[in-house]
Amino acid sequence: AEGGNGGEKPRSYSPLFKHGSSKSLVGTTSIRKQGGRSMAVVPLLSLRLGSTGLIDLGGGLLAQQIHGTDPLDQIVTIDCGGVVFRTCRRTLHKHPGSLLHGMVQPGGELHTESCVFIDRDNRCFASILNYYRTGELDEPKHISDEAWKHELAFYKIEDPAMIIPTEEELELRQQALGKPASKGIRQKIWSLWEDPSSSRAARYLMLISVFLSVFAVCAFVLETQPAIRHRDPTYTVFTFDGGGIQRILNTFETVVIVFFTIELLSRFLATSKKKAFLLSPLNWMDAITVLPFYVGLTLVGSSSSESVQSNTTFVRVLKIGRLSRILGLAFKLGKYSNGVRVLARTMKTCMAELSILAVLLVMAVIIISSGIYFCESTYDVDYEGGENPSEFVSISRSMYFSMISVTTIGYGDMSPRTSCGEMVACIAGLSGIFVLGLPISIIGVKFEERYREMTKQMFIQLELDKLIHVQKKLDAFQGMGEIASALLGTGQSFRGDLSEGDLQKLNKRAQEIFLKVDTDGSGEISLEELSSAVSELGMDVEDDVLEVMMNVVDVDGSNSISAYEFSVFLQKAVTGELVQMCKDYIKNKGKG
């Protein structure tokens, strides 16, 4: 028998096995109904395997003798896609609500029989069965995320990695990051700077921070233009000469520094974990963005213009400060980039591979540098009588050539002139393939894993934000009971239970609207058609709220609503139960 797709339950069967010259005693095949489907059931009695004794594969007779009389200890056989798996009924009694759990319940295929066939991917089933055994759900390798998602939906298992946290869990996570536990001005300031999803003002503040970071980097680049740096009066842009442009850029830079200073101080004062705040590398990057500005301002204010111009060390300190500022701005901009965060996590989890890469690279550079030096250092003496000396004057100088060659860049500004040196250069190029290739491939795999984790986290956050947004809309939603006047002609909102006559009117009206919006005559209406049906009733329901309502009444999980489900939808809407059902659905969705 073949297993169905989608929400259809797989059909049961009892296979016949032969082993050598053993004889099997079987009854006659019978066709019976179970769950609305016909199943071929072969009552396999026992199988004699010579010296191995009797092994029961169908009725579970000897399974009871071996494992006791408890029905939960009986062994069941699951053939998934041609691969046979065996386990105990007790194992499948875990995770209520899942497909296999339902099979071992009264009326299920594995409750009355010991064998079942499921026409699904057996690679995924191995991980799913291990989930029942250990409680840990691991996604199989070489299986796409979309295929894994469909398999989990078929077995009615929710991926633990995709469970949306509740508001209480989210609050605990934020408190672990430094959010004050008690409500007050500090908590509001923390949410304003650290949680963009907390309010519209927080989102605008994040956008302003990104805007200032981007344009501050652009301003720093423009300042290095010769006409602006030297205040060229002949260079004009929109009536501003070089000096005017420089003053505008300096003013903008001051505004940016003041904004980021307020941000840094506000976050430090608001957080409840100040030690962790001070030890965070990202916060040090923010400090590097603003501190050089104030250091340079202090030094300029405490020194005369003549000493500033003549003190070379002072000028270098200012240049290093400006360089630190641009690095801080670049890192600050990277905080808002998902790719940069993935790269940082990859580097953190690949320290072992990076250390191997560093050791191999250092070894290769030292060996190649030494070889090229001893091959090339005496070239002018041996071949040109002391004239035209070699560029490889020392091993330290040769390290530049080795690094460029091993990393397969090869600028060509230094090149060997002896046969020995050319051979060493060839070895340097070939060694780069092995030195860099193997560790980098491992780092690439790690990067892909971190990227997949990031996409899942982004999906979870989007779903959480969506549910919270719908929850707020449901809290403010009014007038669901007002549709009673349109459906029943009561002229007022309905309160209480529906009478038999009201139910007949409602079902008749529901049938009329359903047939009107079901334009394709499929007997099912989609979300778009449900929106049209709601509009027919004079209700104004937003799409995201309507999607939750549809999930509540779509009991068979078909992503569409039948005529009966639409009638239930209207009944719950009239009695006012639908809004509460949607709230309960969001709450249970958050709990997973």
Image: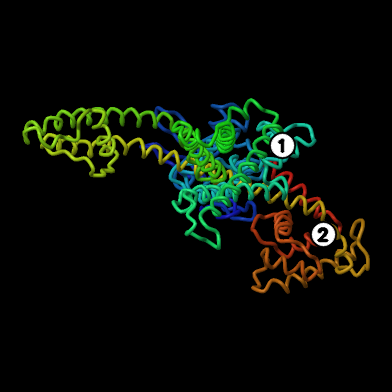
Q: Residue 590: x percent and y percent?
A: 69, 43
Per the image, the residue denoted by label 2 is 573
**Tag 2, which secondary structure?**
helix
Name the amino acid type tagged 2.
Ala
Residue 493 is marked as none
Crowding near the residue tagged with mark 1, few <14, some 14–19, many ≥20 C-alpha atoms within 10 Å: some
Q: Which element carries disc 1, helix, strand or loop?
A: helix
Q: In this view, does 466 lie to the left or right of 137?
A: right
Between 32 and 116, the one nearer to me in the picture:
116
Number of disc labels: 2
Which residue carries the number 1 mark?
Answer: 171
Question: For residue 419, what is the image quadrant?
Answer: top left
Disc nearest the viewer among 1 and 2: 1
Q: How crowded is mark 2: few (under 14 residues within 10 Å), some or many (20 or more)?
A: some
For residue 127, side relative to residue 442 (left or right): right
Task: Work out which quarter of the rendered image holds the C terminus and state it.
Answer: top right
Dot 1 or dot 2: first in sequence order is 1
Along the line of sight, the residue nearer the viewer: 413 or 62: 413
In percent of width and height, residue 345 lies at 50, 36
Q: Locate residue 313, reporting x and y percent.
A: 45, 31
Residue lying at 57% horizontally and 33% vertically, measured from the top left? 295
Residues under numbered marks 1 and 2 in contact, where contact means CB atoms less than 8 Å apart = no
Point out residue 483 in the picture as x, y percentages from the top left corner.
Answer: 85, 65
Residue 398 seen in this snapshot: yes
Which residue: 66% across, 39% down?
263
